[in-house]
Amino acid sequence: MARRRQIYEGKAKILYEGPEPGTLIQYFKDDATAFNAQKKGTISGKGVLNNRISEHVFTLLGAIGIPTHFIRRLNMREQLIRQVEIVPIEVVVRNVAAGSLSKRLGIEEGTPLPRTIVEYYYKDDALGDPMISEEHVLCFGWASQDELHDMADMAIRVNDFLTGLFAGIGIRLVDFKLEFGRIWDNDFGRIILADEISPDGCRLWDMASGEKLDKDRFRRDLGGEVEAYQEVARRLGLLPEGEGDSAVLDLESHRKRRGK
C-alpha cells in the first residue's frame, strides 16, 4: 500500500491527502489535551467514538441544510472530508455559564444564561487562543463581515438543532466550539462547517444528575472519560446497549448489523 502524504497533525486529528483533488482524510487520534496542550494524555478509544459521533452529528446537520466539509466515514477512525481553507477563528456558543466564562465573570458554573452568547477566539496555540471581538476579526482580515455573519448564523442554527437533539436523550448542551472553512469555486468563496463536533469540543451534562459527559472529565481529573464518551454515543444510538469498553471496538460491526 502506498504511503499516504500527511498534510497536517493537530492535537486530536491528523489530515492526510485525499484520494481525489479537493479532498482530505481526517484521522481521529486518542490523544487528549487541555489548557492549550499544557496537559496531555490519552483516552483509549476516544478517536473511534469521536469519529462516529461527529459523523452522526454532521450528517444530521447536512440534512437540515448546514453546509459541512463531511463527505463520508471511511472506517473506525477516518473520514473523507472536503479540503477547506480554515478560518483562524474558533466560534464558541454558550447556553450555560461554565469554564472560562464562569472564571472571567465570576458567574457560578451551571447558571443558565439569559440569552445564548456567541464568542470568537483567535486560533493560535502559542498565544493561548485569545478571545477576540468582531472588530479584531475585521481589522486583521481573518474573515469578512459577510463571512462573520454566515458563521454566527450557522452557529445559532447548529445550537438550536443540537440543543433539541441532546435534550431528547437527557443531555444538556452547555456550550460548544465550532470551526469553519472556506471552500472556493473559482474566485468565489463560501463558508462551511469544518473540524468535528464531539464530546472533545462540547460541554454535555446529564440533565438529571449534572454528571459531565465530555472532556471536562479529563481537564478536571474526574476520571471515567471513556465511559462518558461511550454514554453519549450510546444515547445517540451509536453503540449497542449494555456493552462496555469492547463496544468501542465493535462499532464497525454494529454499524453493519444496522445496515448503515
Image (spheres, helix red, strand yellow):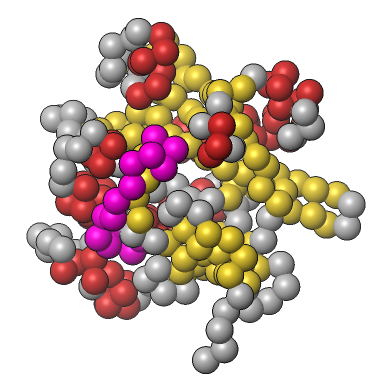
**Residue 150 in the image, given as x and y percentages of width and height:** 69, 34
Judged from this view, the residue extending furthest toward the right is 187
Q: Which residues are magenta?
A: 35-49
Find residue 179 and report its image quarter: top right
Judged from this view, the residue extending furthest toward the bottom is 1
**Residue 40 in the image, given as x and y percentages of width and height:** 33, 47
What is the quadrant of the C terminus in the image? bottom left
Q: Is residue 84 above or below residue 26?
A: above
Q: Is residue 209 left or right of residue 83?
A: left
Residue closest to the eye, 133 or 31:
31
Q: Is residue 171 above or below residue 68?
A: above
Residue drawn at the location 13% of the way across and 30% of the way down: 209
Residue drawn at the location 55% of the way across and 37% of the way down: 126
Asked if residue 167 can be seen in this view, the reply is no
Q: Is residue 93 above or below residue 169?
A: above
Find residue 105 and report its image quarter: top left
Residue drawn at the location 57% of the way across and 79% of the way down: 4
**Residue 156 in the image, given as x and y percentages of width and height:** 54, 30
Residue drawn at the location 21% of the way across and 53% of the way down: 226
